[in-house]
Image (tube, rainbow, N blue to C red):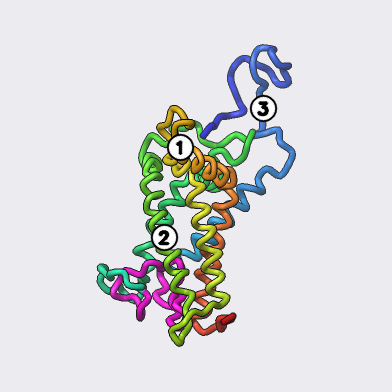
Amino acid sequence: MATGTLNTDQGGSAGAPPGGGGRARLAGRTLRTDRWWVPPALTAAGLLFFIAYGTFRIFTSRWYYVSDYRYLAPFYSPCLSDSCVGDSNAGFPTFVPSLPTWLSPAFIILIFPAGFRLTCYYYRKAYYRAFWLSPPACAVAEPHTKYTGETRFPLIFQNVHRYFFYAAIVVAGILTYDVVLAFHDPDGGIGMGLGTLILLVNVVFIWAYTLSCHSCRSIVGGRLNHFSKHPVRYWFWQQVSKLNAQHMLLAWVSLFTVLLADFYVLLVSSGAISDLRFF
């Protein structure tokens, strides 16, 4: 990430014209007069809200499964602990022993989608700017005196993003399976409710965000010298590139669809609301 400072020591003077012996000395951090601080502030607020909700769910070992309609909250899927209620494990082995009452099964699985988003190229830009002010906005100097990039601890671990991408593909596949199970009727037939649609919309955006990842684009179209000799991979690369152009938008939309889906299951499971059934 490019950084820098507006105060340089190259022999220039304040107000020096272009080519007049260096850059001008600026007393402030920026000459921008717009509200440049609004985007990083909104980004910080959005991320903090999601972090607060996720923390709440990690330490809430209830209200994550609706057995009648087989709605499983995305934060808990797949449920791999002996603490899982009913048949919420959806046939997956529960190889993790029962957890303490203050710790939920979400703690086990959230590591993977959280790691994928934390190391995502877009989210790096978002929280670097919002929390570390590195830099807070374009043409605004950051408060740090030096920049070492992602070559030292702990940021060197950002390089594991591609491996989190593989895990995210597995998680997206499991969430898709959950949607199939959610087309369930208490009598054993096929049914659909508002919760089914919410889970379906969520998994669509989860897939769109996952496949729009820069690593996915590199995997699909990388290491090729001639696209003409690989028409199938070229076609897939084109489709992923279209998604990649919307990566920022998909990152935010999918963040809040997964929160909405999880919160809806929480409300139905707790008895706060009843699921609206269509058939």
Query: Mark 3 = which residue?
Result: 26
Nearer-N-terminus badge (2/3): 3
Viewer-closest of 120 and 27: 120
Q: Amino acid at mark 2?
A: Gly
Query: Mark 1 = which residue?
Result: 221
Q: Nearer the viewer, mark 1 or mark 3?
A: 1
Q: Position of residue 73 (x, y in %)?
A: 46, 71
The region drawn magenta spans: 59-88
Whether residue 132 is visible here, answered yes or no, is no
What is the quadrant of residue 107 in the picture? bottom left
Viewer-closest of 26 and 76: 76
Q: Amino acid at mark 3?
A: Leu
**Mark 3, secondary structure of its residue:** loop
Does residue 137 belong to the magenta stretch?
Answer: no
Query: Mark 2 = which residue?
Result: 173
Q: Position of residue 126 (x, y in %)?
A: 55, 46
Mark 2 touching mark 3, by CB under 8 A? no
For disc 1, the neighbor class at 10 Å (few under 14, some 14 to 19, many from 20) is many
Relative height, residue 191 to residue 6 (above, below)? below
Q: Residue at 43%, 27% (x, y): give it.
A: 225
Q: Residue at 46%, 82% (x, y): give it.
A: 189
Q: CA distance from mark 2 to mark 1?
A: 22 Å
Does residue 64 belong to the magenta stretch?
Answer: yes
Mark number for residue 83? none
Q: Residue at 67%, 21% (x, y): give it.
A: 24
Q: Nearer the viewer, mark 2 or mark 3?
A: 2
